[in-house]
Image (spheres, rainbow, N blue to C red):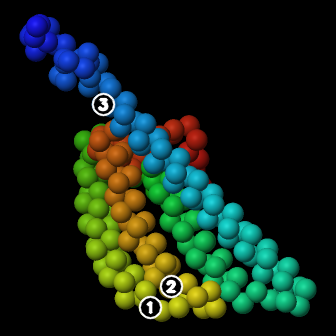
Amino acid sequence: MSDNTGDSGAHRDGGQDQGSPSAETGRRGAGAVLWSIYDRLETVLTLVALSATILTVLIAAVGRTAGMPVRSAPQLALLFLIWAIILGADICLKKGEHIRVSVIADSVPNALRRILAALHLLLIVPFLVFLAWYGFDLAAGNWQRQLGATGLSYGLITLALPVGSLLFLVSIARRFFSYGLDATLEPQDHHLESPL
């Protein structure tokens, strides 16, 4: 019986040695697929929330015009809009497309620009952790409160704050490990950036 555990790197499953470059690429490829699914799911949820906001406002307007107002429509539109904003803000953060004032950062040397980027992250990350930590308490405290005539919990609205904060933290971490400190909060495509 032959032993497949020699120095050849072959395993019983016929795969590559775990330390080999192709095994490392396979692990990165699987991670990239999972992140791609995560990004697509977030985009779909954002579009669903935005579409639901528009549809709810349309139904409310038509109902009011027809003399049959939908009492829960404004609260539902608010719920969907808040989630669309939070999810959309995270999509922008992932691409570095938030509004920013770059006059100072663009006019200083690279070493100082790194210090400014680190300072920004030192302010943003603890604030997001604070919002996530206390936001879940806020959502739990509002869970028994009703959202107008919908019968839903008001906690669904306040839950957007901690969930959004966690999503922002994940996006910042992804950009930091993918692009480094300098480009964590920078846009991916500087050619699309335009002055106000």
Where residue 10 sits, quadrant-wise, is top left
Horizontal side of 21 relative to 62 (left or right) equals: left
Quarter that holds the C terminus: bottom right
Three-letter code, disc 1: Gln
Q: Secondary structure at mark 1?
A: loop
Q: Can residue 146 be seen here?
A: yes
Q: Which residue is mark 2?
A: 153
Q: Which residue is mark 3?
A: 27
Above or below — where is 174 with respect to 134? above
Above or below — where is 90 with respect to 80? above
Between residues 11 and 144, which one lies in front from this camera angle?
A: 11
Q: Residues within 10 Å of mark 1 (few under 14, many from 20)?
A: few
Q: Residue at x 40, y 59 (%)?
A: 167
Mark 3 → mark 2, Cα distance in angstroms: 41 Å
Q: Position of residue 22 (x, y in %)?
A: 29, 18
Q: Position of residue 87 (x, y in %)?
A: 51, 61
Where residue 13 sits, quadrant-wise, is top left
Three-letter code, disc 3: Arg
Q: Secondary structure at mark 2?
A: loop
Q: Residue at x 32, y 26 (%)?
A: 26
Between residues 101 and 20, which one lies in front from this camera angle?
A: 20
Q: Residue at x 50, y 85 (%)?
A: 154
Horizontal side of 95 relative to 64 (left or right) equals: left
CB within 8 Å, label 1 to label 2: yes
Three-letter code, disc 2: Ser
- Badge 3 or badge 2: first in the primary sequence: 3
Q: Can residue 21 be seen here?
A: no
Q: Which residue is mark 1?
A: 144
